[in-house]
Image: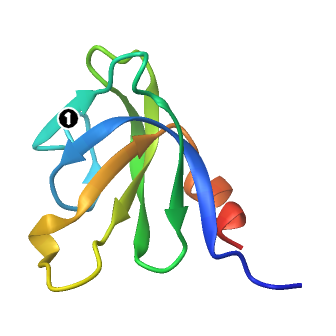
Amino acid sequence: MAAASAFSSYIYGEIQGQPPFSGTQPFSRAWAYSASARGNRSFPVQGTVIHPVNPGVQLTGGGAYIYSIIEEFPGGLTTGADTKKYATSDSVATLATARG
């Protein structure tokens, strides 16, 4: 059985901030996507890191509780400041299983 090269998760919005993401205000900035912009998104297995959010945090304006952050590192000649961090209600264990 071949290893997965991508996994997907339902994304509710984006955040700014650095891990660890814990406490009642774990992000320096968070924003929920509009209902039409939310949905399943595919991520490459290589170039992503999954961070837990403990305890789960409700996104303002989004209604969803966030339990994980998927940090996606861009390819090429970019820096760590260019990473995007996506908010999902999936647990770290669920995402780890999806990654294979």
In-image side of 16 versus 32 (left or right): left
Q: Is residue 34 above or below residue 27?
A: above
Going by the numbered disc 1, the residue's amino acid type is Ala
* Of the pair 86 and 6, the residue shown nearer to us: 6
In-image side of 53 versus 2 (left or right): left
Tell me the residue that label 1 is attached to.
Answer: 30
Q: Quadrant of the N terminus?
A: bottom right
Taking the spot 74% from the left edge, 82% from the top edge, the residue there is 3
User: Residue 36: x and y, percent?
Assistant: 43, 18
How was this image coloured?
Answer: rainbow
Residue furthest to the front in view is 76
Taking the spot 42% from the left edge, 16% from the top edge, the residue there is 35
User: Residue 30: x and y, percent?
Assistant: 20, 35
In-image side of 64 versus 78 (left or right): right
Instruction: State the image quarter where residue 61 is shown.
Output: top left
Q: Is residue 89 above or below residue 97?
A: above
* Of the pair 52 and 50, the residue shown nearer to us: 50
Taking the spot 39% from the left edge, 48% from the top edge, the residue there is 53
Taking the spot 23% from the left edge, 84% from the top edge, the residue there is 76
User: Residue 12: x and y, percent?
Assistant: 41, 31
Q: Quadrant of the C terminus?
A: bottom right
Instruction: State the image quarter where residue 49 is shown.
Output: bottom left
Which class describes the residues within 10 Å of circle 1: few (<14), some (14-19), or many (20+)? some
